[in-house]
Image (cartoon, helix red, strand yellow):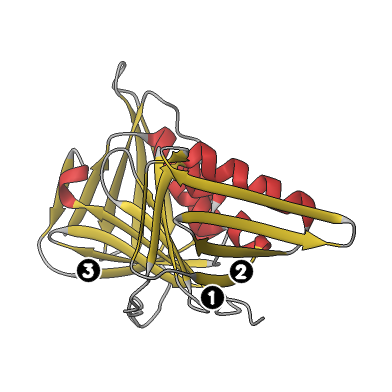
Amino acid sequence: MFRAIYPSASKFKYVAQTLAKIVDEIPFYAEPDALEVRVLSPDKTTMTILKIPSIAFEEYICEEETFFVIGSDEFNRIARRGTRNDLVILELDSENKMLKFMFKDKKTGIERVFLLSLKERVSERLPEPSIELAVSARMLSDDYKNIIRDLKIVGEEAIFMYKDGKLVIKSMAQQKEYEGIFEQDNPLITLTATVEKALARYSIGLLEATLKAAAASKNVEIQFDTDKPLRVEFELPTGGSIIYWIAPRSA
């Protein structure tokens, strides 16, 4: 049996939008201690991981590891119907191969019920990359959004550098250039590194795809290293996280 009550429909809709932007089908892995999704973009350039621990739900019942898949477009369309007064209730009906998606108004108690058909799929859980990344920076999600939007104005490729104790993010195109220099407390919350220098390049289009998750989070942590994937982690306000692994571009 699987049943979960998430406390904020308005936040949950951003989670649904994040997943729908990447894949056509969402594989859910429900375990006694957490609900998790791991998906790889069709071009294999981005891996997205959603982790919501059981304690982040108002109610969470999962007696054994359960796997189910639903269409992302349908899931997203329903999630968008939630309001700030609604709880989200997910309940699996394995016998009829359906997911019951409900909204419950916290003030009036009114419930709205949607049914989603499950997809017949084989469980193929993706392993999360195990890579040491030398540079880590934590900032407000609003600052992160501004950086990505500034980059988008200029070009298609972002250069992430760490040098002289500073994070430098650049983009260059014909007759255009952007450079942002970021330090701890200006505006970074934290900045740590185990190397003196690091440099990697990433697609701005892939970075832009992470902005949906930023709407559901106050803070974000980015980690990178020379010619290695970028790890972007958004903290969900009720607990849990959305993590992106973005493949680097070659020089």
**Relative vertical location of residue 242 with respect to residue 198 in this rendering, above or below:** above
Amino acid found under the numbered disc labelled 1: Ala
Amino acid type at circle 3 is Thr
Instruction: Find the distance from the CA under tag 1 to the CA under tag 2.
Output: 7 Å
Coordinates of residue 194 in the picture (x, y in percent):
33, 68
Q: Which mark is residue 132?
A: none
Q: In this rendering, which labeled residue sits more in front, label 3 or label 1?
A: 1
Quickly name the residue at label 2. Answer: 202
**Picture coordinates of residue 143, whole percent (x, y):** 53, 39
Residue at image mark 1:
247
Q: Is residue 50 left or right of residue 59?
A: right
Task: Tell whether label 2 touches label 1 (CB within 8 Å).
Answer: yes
Which residue type carries mark 2? Answer: Tyr
Name the residue at the top extreme.
Answer: 107
* In the image, residue 16 above or below residue 6: below
For disc 3, the marked residue is: 66
In primary-sequence order, the first of circles 2 and 3 is 3
Nearest-to-viewer mark from 2 and 3:
2
> Is 148 located above or below residue 9 in the figure?
below
Q: Is residue 17 visible?
A: yes
The residue that appears at 67% across and 46% down in the rendered structure is 149
Of callouts 3 and 1, the N-terminal one:
3
